[in-house]
Amino acid sequence: MAGLDFGKLTKRSVVDTATEPRRIFTALPARASKYARPWDVQAQVWDSWHDRRTESDLLIKMNTGGGKTVVGLMMLKSCLNEGIGPAVYITPDIYLADQVRAEADALGVETTDDPRSGRFQSGKAILVTYIHKVINGMSVFGVVGDTRQRIPMGTVLVDDTHACLATLERQFSLVIPRDHPAYNELADLFDDALRDQSSSAVRDLAEDVPGVALPVPYWAWADRREQVLNRLHPHHDSNNAFKFVWPLIREVLHLCDVAITYSAIEIRPPCPPIDRIPSLAAARRRIYLTATLADDSVLVTHFDAASATVATPITPLTADDLGDRMILTPLETFPGTSDEQVRDFLVEQARVHNVVVIIPSGRRAGFWRDVANAVHDSSTIHDGVRALRAGHVGLVVLINKYDGIDLPRKACRILALDGLPEAYSALERIEALALDESQAMITRQIQRIEQGMGRGVRSNDDHCVVLLIGPKLTQRLHHAAAKFSPATRAQLELSAEVADMLYGKPFVDLGSVIDQCLDRDAAWVSASRDALDGVTYPTTSTVSEVAVAEREAFRLAELGRFSEAHDAMRAAINATTIERRHRGWLKQRAAGYLHLTDPAAAMQLQKSAQTDNKAVLRPRDGVEYHRLRSIADQARQSAEYLTKRYKDGNELVLGIGALVDDLVPDTDPARVPSFEQAIHDLALHVGFSAQRPERETGEGPDVLWSLGELAYVVIECKSGSTSDAIWRHDAEQLSHSMDWFHEKYDRTCTATPVLIHNTNALHKQASARFGSKVITFAKLAQLRETLKKYAAALAVNNDYRDHDKLATQLATWGLNSKAFIAKWGVQTFKS
């Protein structure tokens, strides 16, 4: 007997007609057995989303491993059934897009990777693609100003949204390399404006001194708008950098931030003009899918999301579905432990487990390269991930990869984050310098750290141990723990109890404790589950008023309403409580808009910005220099500074450890500003006064110290030098700084010229200023070790609070004003 045609029993499939995601999921006829039923967290999110689905910008927050991909696919299928198509699922990169399509296949949901597909454009299949494909100046979806037929979008879902941000910023950043003809054309055009900011920095730039990144003053950039266009427009299709970026920024070129380094010129608008991709801007529904991160303001500034809806995210009822993580800080738990000890420990652990170390930059790779089984950067990262997921590799180092990768189960049983995330591009470095230690910058770092910590646990039944390495990272954890998501905070609090139990024990005990976690010790598993029990998501997201104002101001400026743009920024600055240096940075942004309608008023505002933050642009008529006061009592001043900065001896050890980390010479340009700041901060730690005149006024030395009794030290830092001789340029720069000192200070004041350099050997064409000293890198290494011992001695019984004991320690270690230069500086000689 022939079978029956059951297709006649229904004319309307639930899968293709229902709008409730849970109903669609349950009705999928060909889904794999692992999708037997939806998880509670998925159903909760679906129900909440369905009630609010008509809102244009919705934020979905779910813990890693909560089944976000399935959630997203069902929501898009619901929108198609409702006629809100075509539907686009956007991932951070092509590899994750492949993973989403594979999961869709397992569910039995039709997808495509072709935007021109008739099935996609007719609302039959979901387009799964990656952000670079959607947002670029040659986008297949169409760009404002081109003549191509636009591909519409009805519903757009951006998955792992925070991981998409870096790509989004790159797509709106025009980077002109030095070998491109437009580089010299622009550099010559703004040479005078750059010299007004810092003539010495311009000389450094010309000679490729590491670390120099100069901002082009907004007034010069705006005033020479036509000249800039004349120089750039002929190159608009000269290479991929222009082809894929120029169409996105050409209409807002006059509003852009601009920075120049020896290797490139970078041009980027304050906020991405996302409306240059009309289909994306016109989508009726936009859904942002992300893990639980602390600050979602970037959705407003970068994606132009509606702040009201983003501020009320959709979440599961509880946040307790996170995998098990034991999070430890070895340098704090085992005082006196060195980075080398931790590294050797991880090498041993890698004999049994896959150990993944995330480092912030290639600079740090040298510390791990000799012991690592593999080191991967952006070009090889996905091959590295595949190898880890396939089996045992050992110790694998990933450079600057805090998001966008999955390392479940045995792919990563021990995850280490070594150091704080760093800024890379020229504009990022300028902003990081201006906002250093501000809450805005700390929040960004914490989000990157939390993203990194999530790489090793990809489901609620997964587990791993996370080690946070490095004094600066450990110190940051102390002061910003509240910025982590609720589930991560709960795990940190539990791990702090573990650390307390370990405190005072030998470092070797760390291995057995890690084994307890990885071998699933019943008591630990129970404690870990209990720590997360009852943890819920915040009912509101953090979207700052400042972020909303920045986006609105940029929108108004795009429309040519510059006064209103300035007013929007100023209103937000006045209405919110923000740190002084952040206020200065925002005033500069407001002044940039105001300049386009009232240059005189803008320059007055820029002066106010410079008063709040010395790292912003100097006004046209310069900055008045204020002499560095002389100290009266070094030990007393040091005690006051340290007591205010550190709550106990352990924090002091971590703080000076972080300082010592920044006192390491490095050819990486990104590290130069932090080295100079560390030389400044070193003075404060030992009780001297300090300034950074060149940064603050555009003239003078990198750092100036006051040792007391009208004695000063004029310091030029060459932390990126690798030559075996002091070149004429470096010697002359120190001499010029001494001339500056004698111009600013009267004859009662004396100064010692000091160069920090690889060597104290003068090139045959170089001449040293009389009395010059060099702190060589070898001497600097000795100083770093001495500072660690000094900190350990002062930490005992919190002796750093007693200025008499502090005076004794300063003298003992050669750190007092009488001994410092004699002990750590050496004479120059002709090579």
Image (tube, rainbow, N blue to C red):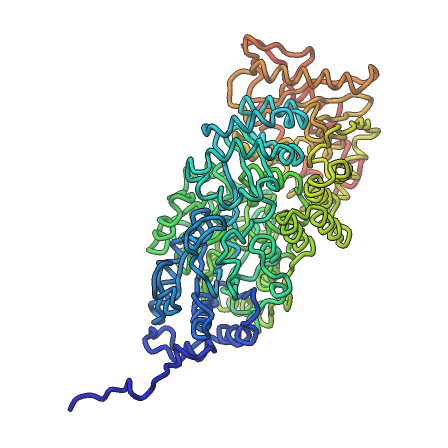
Above or below residue 540? Residue 337 is above
Instruction: Please indicate whether residue 339 sits to the left or right of residue 562 in the image.
Output: left
Above or below residue 249? Residue 549 is below
Residue 315 position by quadrant: bottom right
Residue 114 position by quadrant: bottom left
Above or below residue 414? Residue 311 is below
Instruction: Please indicate whether residue 242 sits to the left or right of residue 101 in the image.
Output: right
Residue beneath the point at 53% across and 32% down: 230
Farthest residue toward the left?
1
Residue beneath the point at 69% across and 13% down: 771
Residue 755 position by quadrant: top right
Residue 554, position as x, y percentages in the image: 63, 49
Q: Is residue 795 visible?
A: no
Give the quadrant of the N terminus: bottom left
Q: Is residue 567 visible?
A: yes
Residue 404, position as x, y percentages in the image: 46, 54
Farthest residue toward the bottom?
1
Farthest residue toward the front?
147
> Is 548 or 527 nearer to us in this picture?
548
Instruction: Please indicate whether residue 798 sits to the left or right of residue 734 in the image.
Output: right
